[in-house]
Image (spheres, helix red, strand yellow):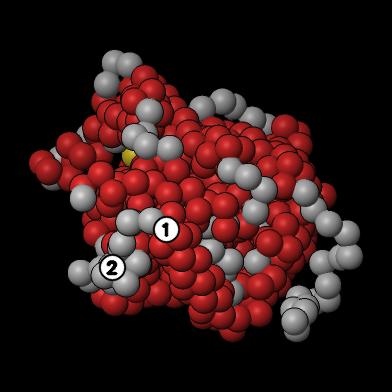
Amino acid sequence: MIKNTLLFGKLGNFEVSRKTAIAAAIAITAVVIIDYLASREMFPYDNFSGGIIFGLTIAAGAVGSFIILKYVSQVSAEVRAKSLLFDRIFKVVTAVMLVLVVTFVAMFVGFYYYNVSVRYLVYFVFSLSTIVSIGIMITIGFKFFSWYKVSRGKDRDTHRILLVCGLAAASLAAAMAFDAGSKMLLVRVVEEESPPSSIPQDIFIYKNDEKYQGDLQYKVVKPDTTTLYIVPSSIKIIYQYLNGWIPIAVSYVFTWAITTMLLRQYHHQRVGKMPAILLILLIIPLVLYMIGRYTQFYTLFTGTLWRWDDFPNGYLFQWILRAGVISGSIMFGVAFFVIARKVEAGKIRDYFTIAAIGAMMMGITLGPSAQQQTFGVAGRALMLLASFMLCAGFYLSAVHMAQDSRLRRLIKASAGSKVFGTMATAQLEQETEKKVLDIIEKEREIIKEQTGIQPSLEQKDVKTYLDSVLLEIQSKK
């Protein structure tokens, strides 16, 4: 087998365990949650505490990304050997993550040591991470839609999962594009000379300012210059529509849907019905998220700009929304982690783990404000890693379970056919089992050759399922 190398060299010769990768993902998620809450005015910060938060983000992003990508490199080696597209995506993501981390360090030095605005580095980080993330989503989304087209009339569950996977990828790409476009093209940036003895700080304001004829959103004060981010009054309502929250809300719903569908299909194939308690736990974050988006839905359907500040208890809606985003993302990840723990060691366990990491990180990394010049945009740029993990995890898990379903249908068809359906004697029953097992083994090899993914149904699983099918056929006779 040809071993793939990274664009900047090998990630290392050591092995990363599944538990280590999960710990790295949790550390990154925890830091991005802090970025999210701080850049969304959920708790105050100053120049000193902002530097600490940014330092933690850089450390978690650098070390955590290295560990996670090494883990993906290990478990997807066979797939990358068979799929040039997947291998190239992996290499691009790894190289871009390295560039981003180096840029974060440059931003830290410029912003906190030299006390200057790093606005142009922010544009570079935000643009690069967004463009690559959108590219990943579009590429994987196209694959899902093409498989959806081919799968028509073959397997209803797999057919629906592929469609929703494609829609989730497309909506996430749209969310990123609208959000980046509105922030970089519609927000006016003004630089002024700072008053004498100005204290370095950066603060969010979100107030209308007549002097600048628009909403003053964010201000960066440095000894020499003050940088102001303003949404002109003439395009305020357009900015609200294009700011990305609508496609972000849609993508959240699709991510929730595909998570629920994949877990439901897994339970249906392996255990039975999905437990009601798990379904309830998945629904709660979705409800909280929609309640938190209430004011923005009101603006969408009425055309009247209605913000949280218009409410006596506006912070309540903000906290509900943040709780929905954070709890939903964590719940998506936990659901996959729980299933992965129940799966016997094998590729499907690793694929569920990758899906768990992506699902847990995706919604949260879309939360931090990319206007905030340090930890905000850094936390947001980590959506690149989340995008890759989400697409890779859902892609590998969906294909794996589709193959599982394909083998089960083949077992049932073979056992019930005229050739193998006779159950008169034990001798014929043994012959039936042997012939079916031979067919399934050949099919397993074909699937592995086509995709590089080893089907999850082992020989003992095949025998167990075949016995149940034969009993079913016998009872009907």
Q: Secondary structure at mark 2?
A: loop
**Could you say where residue 246 lies in the image, as x and y percent from the top left?**
28, 50
- Determine which quarter of the picture holds residue 418: bottom left
Q: Is residue 169 left or right of residue 434?
A: left
**Vertical placement of residue 102 versus 450, above or below:** above
The furthest residue to the left: 302
Q: Amino acid at mark 1?
A: Glu
Horizontal side of residue 9 vs 179, given as left or right: right
Q: Residue at x 30, y 63 (%)?
A: 421
Quarter-of-image position of residue 120: bottom right
Which residue is under mark 2?
Answer: 417
Where on the picture, by quarter, is residue 152? Answer: bottom left
At horizontal 33% and vertical 77% (from top left) the residue drawn is 146
Q: Residue at x 48, y 48 (%)?
A: 464
Answer whether residue 178 is visible to the viewer in this image.
no
Expressed as whole percent of the image width and height from the top left, the position of residue 38 reads 57, 34
Mark 1 Cα within 10 Å, few/some/many (few <14, many 20+)? some
In this rendered view, identify the residue nearer to me: 408 or 22: 408
Q: Secondary structure at mark 1?
A: helix
Distance from Cα at disc 2 to Cα at disc 1: 13 Å
Residue contact at pointers 2 and 1, CB within 8 angstroms: no
Residue that carries the numbered disc 1 in the rendered image: 429
Identity of the residue furthest to the top in this view: 312
Q: Nearer the viewer, residue 157 or 373?
A: 157
Tag in front: 2 or 1: 1
- Rendering coords of residue 140 (x, y %): 44, 70
> What amino acid is labelled 2 in the image?
Ser
Give the numbered dot on residue 30: none
